[in-house]
Image (cartoon, helix red, strand yellow):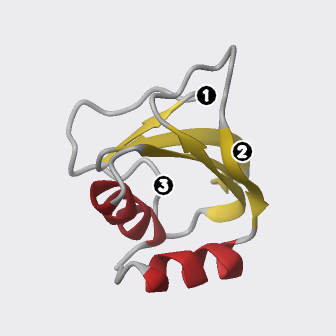
Amino acid sequence: MTPGFRLEQYTLKRPKEVLLVRALVAGEADEVVIFRGFSSSLVRPTAFDPDVPVLPEGADIQSIDILEGPYTPEHPRYLQSGLSWPQMVSVLESVGV
């Protein structure tokens, strides 16, 4: 199970939360919003096909913020911020993902 898929599954279990993921994808910085099982890049074009992962297998996740949904860039409501991938894995495991 890829990290991106696990994060999408988390947001299905926590539909009132939004994840803001900062990652390096193919060496380039990206920011991805994940909400209710769907991912969308804020930096790169997002494929129309939901089977094309926005965070591919080799993505280097730098940090993850958990926000209260819906996400509004002007007034984000942070629940947790700056989580590393190992810290997020603990959160994922706590909800069975």
**Helix, strand or loop status at disc 3:** loop
Callout 3: few (<14), some (14-19), or many (20+) C-alpha neighbours within 10 Å? Answer: many
Dot 1 and dot 3 residues touching (CB under 8 Å): no
**Residue 6 percent location from the top left of the image:** 39, 70
Q: Say which residue label 2 marks.
A: 28
Please state if 1 lies on the left or on the right of 29 as rendered: left
The residue tagged 3 is: 55
Residue in view at x 59 percent, y 43 percent: 67
Q: Residues within 10 Å of mark 1 (few under 14, many from 20)?
A: few
Q: Amino acid at mark 3?
A: Leu
Residue 93 or residue 40, whichever sits in front: 93
Residues at discs 2 and 1 in contact (Cβ within 8 Å): yes
The answer to whether 91 appears left or right of 82 in the picture is left
Q: Which of the 4 image quarters holds residue 83? A: bottom right
State the image coordinates of residue 50 (x, y, percent, origin top left).
Answer: 22, 44
In-front residue for pair 94/87:
94
